[in-house]
Amino acid sequence: MVLYTNYELSNAALIKLSSFLFWSWCYLWCTQGFPRHKPEWYSRMVTLLHGSVASFFGFYQCGLTSLSYSKLTEDNTASQYALMVWSWGYFAFDLMWCLIYTPRDYIILLHHASALVGVNVYMGKENTGCSFPCTVALLEITNPLLQTRWFLRECGHNKTVVYYTVEILYLLMFLALRGVLCTYFMYKIILSDTFGMDQKLISFALYIVSSALVYEIFGYIMYKYEKIIVEFIRCISQ
């Protein structure tokens, strides 16, 4: 089977451009379909779409029940490449949006820039197997919760049980996946001969950004839930 990665550079660039234009169109459609909202509202709707689809298909392509090292170096399939294209266009769009509306949010800018470079690295290889689907699923699985939490707060539901349920689930999953699981995977990737140096470097860059986000999330938890945490520890220690 001839893979898309064997296409000429002009065709590969056209595919990326098409993905970027698709996400730009989604954003513009939201501005028309849901008027009178601020730009962040439309951006988060687009982000919710990407995070939900990327998580679902990422885990589906990852094949967690039969995951092995050999599957990380299999020839890429058309569906795996399509997921890369889907994510490349989104990260390119969101990076541009952040540069326009939140140019001082350096951590998020670095996150999207490193993600964009990472997708480029994977798109340039023919035998990364399910490495990219597993990575994007791990990084995006908490995104739908994050966006749902934001929309609930924007609509004035930040004092409801639903809001607190979504927030606590998001915070716990983020710390567990990006703080604990990503640390374990980073350790395995660095020591493994399966991944090339470029993949190790981009994985390390994403890990550093994730660590910074984990630090911010931990600070938020301690600021908002410190009294509850202290009381819980006191109860279980008695």
Image (tube, grey):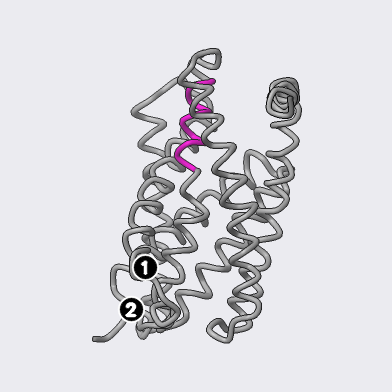
Q: Which residue is at a point 33% across and 57% down the rendered structure image? A: 57
- Characterize the local packing of mark 1: few (<14), some (14-19) or many (20 or more) Cα atoms within 10 angstroms: some
Looking at the image, residue 190 lies above or below residue 148: below
In the image, 126 versus 169, the foreground residue is 169
Q: Which mark is residue 4?
A: 2
Q: Is residue 122 above or below residue 47?
A: below
Residue placed at 63% from the left, 43% from the top? 100
Instruction: Answer whether residue 150 is magenta in the image.
Output: yes
Marks 1 and 2, how far apart at CA = 10 Å
Instruction: Specify the farthest residue to the left.
Output: 1
Residue 91 image offset from top left, x and y in percent: 51, 55
- Camera-nearest label, 1 or 2: 2
Q: Which residues are magenta?
A: 143-153
Mark 1 residue element: helix
Q: Residue at x 46, y 48 (%)?
A: 141
The amino acid marked with disc number 2 is Tyr
Name the element at disc 2: helix
From the image, tell me which residue sits under label 1.
Answer: 15
Q: Is residue 237 left or right of residue 52?
A: right
- Give the image location of residue 30, x and y in percent: 38, 33
Does the CB distance between marks 1 and 2 fall below 8 Å? yes
